[in-house]
Image (cartoon, rainbow, N blue to C red):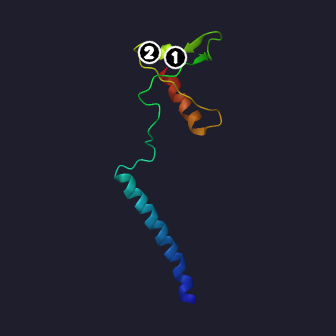
Amino acid sequence: MKRNVLLLPLLIFLLIAAALLWQLARNAEGDDPTNLESALTGKPVPAFRLESLETPGQYYQAEVLTQGKPVLLNVWATWCPTCRAEHQYLNQLS
């Protein structure tokens, strides 16, 4: 009985370690969980009209994205910590 009690934490540790190693090996083979395909890839940009945050009364429309210049359209939320962290870097790009 005492021996079983001592082996149980070791067994749990080994199972967790094996699961972590399996996940690392799976990601090393190219199974990247952050690589998600979008249903909108290759389709035209939907029509939109967004007011500028810097210049009230100025609007951006979908036609801005088709003028032949690269455009970065970042959609984010104030409650998203990752979005807030990347905001300063995107401001440096502008």
Amino acid type for the residue under numbered disc 2? Thr
Q: Nearer the viewer, residue 21 or 65?
A: 65
Image quadrant holding the N terminus, namely bottom right
Residue holding disc 1: 62
Residue at disc 1, secondary structure: helix
How busy is the neighbourhood of tag 1: few (under 14 within 10 Å), some, or many (20 plus)?
Answer: some
Q: Tally the marks.
A: 2
Q: Nearer the viewer, residue 26 or 13?
A: 26
The answer to whether residue 68 is above or below residue 18 is: above
The answer to whether residue 93 is above or below residue 3 is: above
How busy is the neighbourhood of tag 2: few (under 14 within 10 Å), some, or many (20 plus)?
Answer: few
| Label drawn at residue 13 | none
The answer to whether residue 38 is above or below residue 7 is: above
Q: Residue at (46%, 44%) from the top-left corner?
A: 34
Residue holding disc 2: 66
Residue at disc 2, secondary structure: helix
> Residue 41: percent from the left, percent from the top?
43, 31
> Residue 58: percent from the left, percent from the top?
61, 10
Displayed quadrant of residue 50: top right
Q: Residue at (45%, 22%) from the top-left corner?
A: 44
Displayed quadrant of residue 52: top right
The answer to whether residue 74 is above or below residue 69 is: below
Displayed quadrant of residue 37: top left
Q: Are the residues at dot 1 and dot 2 in contact (C-beta closer than 8 Å)?
A: yes
Q: Nearer the viewer, residue 35 or 89?
A: 35
> Residue 11: percent from the left, percent from the top?
49, 76
Spatial distance from mark 1 to mark 2, Cα to Cα?
Answer: 7 Å
Amino acid type for the residue under numbered disc 1? Ala
